[in-house]
Image (cartoon, rainbow, N blue to C red):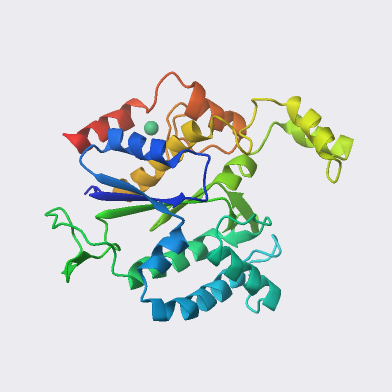
Amino acid sequence: MFRIPSYIHIYGKGVITNPDLEKLSLYLKTLLPESTIDVRTDFISFFLGQLDSSKTDDTVDLLAEKLAGIRVLDYSKQKLNPDPLYAEIDYERRKILIPDIKSIGVFYDGFELQNIFYSLIKRTKGMPAPYSPLLEGGERGGYKDEHSFAHLHIVFTNQFIATWEDDDSRYHSRSSVYGFPSIISTAGIVEAPAKPREFYLMKQQYGIIGRDDLALTEFKNKFEGRFIDYDDPRMTEVCKGYTAQALLFHITGEPFCEDKGCKLFNAHWQAELIYSQLESPYEFCDKHTDMLKRLTY
Ligand SMILES: [Zn+2]
């Protein structure tokens, strides 16, 4: 049974400038022409804006504490940050109120972040909407609930997310965590899929960490084009694949494909990411091309 979303909401406007979220919205429209797609502000601002203004301050405090509590402090420990420091909570509070302030490279547990986001979707009434026969959720006073499968929420963030892996008992940085909502990290796209092995060897050799920007630029030039960088002009194209994975997860529960040339390939290396999203002669493998066609006819 396919769960085809009637509505797709993309979050990040005002904070995320690369990828181009409007272009991603148009891309998803080509995959699901029947769905209504909108691009919204950053996720937390959007849902805070839905709340009764008398509740906003308390919600900001609560959210700040929750977010500080799901920081990954030590990659080798599953325990997060249950007793956050005042400064950590204060940072989160400022970030909630001024979402485009510079991030300081904090890592959050991706699934816990998803839980926090889900609780926000659940407690707000959603946007006014015309009745849709496809909508599974109940109508309440002219508003539609947005926590039903009729809605796909895709959250773009420039923060880092990580998930715990039992296999090697440590946290791993991630480009995306799919679920309700799906979260895509632009910082994760740069840092999570591994760069060429020589990159790490040279980085070690040159002791590049802590060196000046010029040295870093020179160093990066040696590897130009071989990985997706911050402000990379290819970021929008690469993110099409991540949004397609979020869509497939919503529809079938399986976001990934084994085919290295399919946009649904789960890339662990930057070279794989670049091949599957940019260089492959086809967009989707035959199986997924057929599946996507069947959704629209
Ligand atoms: Zn495929």
Left or right of 149 in this view: 101: right
* Residue at the extreme top of the image, as rendered: 281
Task: Looking at this view, name the residue that lies furthest to the left.
Answer: 133
Residue at 64%, 43% (x, y): give it. 191
Residue occupying the point 52% across, 51% down: 15
Residue 126 position, x and y percent, is 29, 64
Picture layout, residue 50 above or below residue 224: below
**As drawn, 1 above or below 218:** below
Answer above or below: position of 163 versus 211.
below
Question: Which quarter of the rendered picture does the C terminus lie within?
Answer: top left
Quarter of the view holding residue 105: bottom right
Q: Residue 237: x, y in percent? A: 47, 31
Quadrant in the rendering for residue 128:
bottom left
Q: Is residue 165 above or below residue 215?
A: below
Which residue is at the front of the view, 247 or 78? Answer: 247
Note whether residue 70 is visible.
no
Q: What number of labels is visible? A: 0
Query: Which quarter is ligand 1 in?
Result: top left
Q: Is residue 64 left or right of residue 55?
A: right
Q: Tell me if residue 224 can be seen.
A: yes
Q: Residue 292 location in percent, x, y?
A: 27, 34
Q: Observer-nearest residue: 15 or 205?
A: 15
Along the horizontal axis of the image, is 145 left or right of 167?
left
Horizontally, is 279 left or right of 35 in the view? right
Image coordinates for residue 66, horizontal then vertical, percent: 55, 73
**Residue at image point 39% right, 46% down:** 246
